[in-house]
Image (cartoon, rainbow, N blue to C red):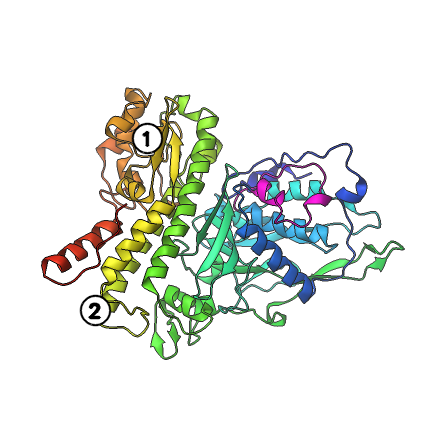
Amino acid sequence: MMSRWRRAAFVTACVLLAAMVGVSGAAHAQDGRWRITKERWEPSDEKAWQDFVAALGAADCWTFDECIKSPANPYRHTDPKTRFYVDCADMPYVLRAYFAWKNGLPFAWQSAMRAADGEKGDIRYSPYGNVIIARDSVPRTANGVPAIPVLHTLVNVVSTAMFRRNSMADDPVMFADTYSPRLTRDAIVPGTITYDVNGHASLVWRVESGGRILIFSSHPDHSLSRSHLGKEFLRTGPELGSIFQKFRPIEVVGATRAPNGALVGGRIVAASNNEIPDFSLEQYHGNPPGDPVRWASSSWVHNDENLDFYTYLRSRLSAGELEYRPVEELRAMMQSICFDVRSRKQAVDISIARGIQNMDPPPRLPDNIYGTHGVWELYSTPSRDARLKTAFKEMYDLVVEFIKMDMVDAPRLNYDGDDLAGDLLAAYWEQNAACSISYVNSAGTTVQLSLDHIIDRLYDLSFDPYQCVERRWGAKGEELATCRDGPLKTRWYEAQRYLRNQIDRTYDVDMGYTIEDLERGPWGLRTGRGVEAGPEVDVRAYLEGLTSRRTASGAIANPPATP
């Protein structure tokens, strides 16, 4: 049982959720007990872990529970009757523990943390990271221990505070559960954790041949999202632990083996940083290696070319030399965004099904809309929406860059056509048609949307769960007519416009404002009231402008496909 002080310290990164894992009385002990039969995680176990995560990431499932019960999980038939509810921080730990349980492997975890500077406050966002002050592990007994309560414990203990610790630390007793890996294809593999210091964690499930990193994560409302790693994952110093982490190798020493093969007693020992083949501080010290503490001034050189960190990362993870196939890149980005929007739909649908839109809004916003608790944490979408906006902006910026590269015949651009803007626009409409999105309005009628609609209304999508479904999807005009929000909620919606314009998540800024506070301003990134305008994201308008000018100049242009 966790003490009162420790339970208070571990409000989870997305929200602390009760595991609510029920075990059927008919479940046999053989199915539900965790017997440790292996002393250590062998390379074959790590490879099986990678395959396990890759299969779940590729599965057509939209909650953690669905994924665990899907055909992608080869162990599903051995489970007791359970339901799994996890958030973003829990998922890497619970999946790793689940896999260890099914394979008789040892498992240990950080069970208590404190801020490195000793200050009180929310250790999910501590400015100097955290230090580990307690550890726990699965007991090693001949009969094993019930596995489900262990998973329950992890859900109630783990938070993104676990990932927010110094990657340079190497304590043999209070060792970190994870370590910093090299930035290579054989190190950044399925099962690698990606940690966003703004309070989010995901798992890598595939690295494409072109170096794009596909990730998936769970959320406080239990929905699952899939995307690719982009600039929304901020690179920071080693004291905060971003971006990449992998589970540290552990082994049981000093145990005896029972007649049934189970290990009994002993203790958990972890590999030190210098004993791990793919340990590296590359993501902090840069290439050529510099001082990881001076991470902000790191340089990134690959094949004698100076790059920014994110281009360097793709170059390092590409199966060959990094080259951009612009039309294929646009298709892939739109497919990823389509996943994000469909995941958002799951979140909004859950909120609407719970009737949150029928409740009266509180008189103030939470102290911080991106990291809080209760109804807002469970059913609002400001963080998810900010990541979605960042994905649209990243797509826009990359398309602009492709056009510039084409103009100078850049060697990294692999394109043989004579109308890049036209070909990109045709691919845009193709992917737009392939991504169908819909919601049921307040009158019970289905409203069809597309990615093109989402771009047009991106800064109108309401993150506020107390508002009608029409406003959650940025409706205007006739589409908004079925909304049942009264004057108060309408006023809240208008007052939140500047917050909707903001794509940067400011977790360290006070945002507990009233409507009057929001309306009166001032506005700016550090005010907590939002910004006056969001960045340009309309890639379709940009490409249409280019093709129109090309046609007007008398050049031959490929006509874009009609939507």
State whether residue 401 appears in this view. Answer: yes
Q: Which residue is mark 2?
A: 407
Q: Write the residue at 73% across / 45% down.
A: 78
In magenta segment, residue 543? no
Look at mark 1 in the image and give the residue it sits on.
Answer: 471
Gap in Å between the C-alphas at discs 2 and 1? 41 Å
Amino acid residing under circle 1:
Arg
Instruction: From the top left corner, tell me how far across and down residue 117 is, in percent.
Output: 49, 53
Name the side, left or right, on which 268 lies relative to 242: right
Task: Give the quarter of the image for residue 29.
Answer: top right
**Helix, strand or loop for the magenta stretch, by majority:** loop
Image x and y of residue 476, in percent: 25, 31
Residue found at x 44% / y 75%: 289
Quadrant occupied by the N terminus:
top right
Q: Which residues are magenta?
A: 64-88
> Is disc 2 placed on a helix, strand or loop?
helix
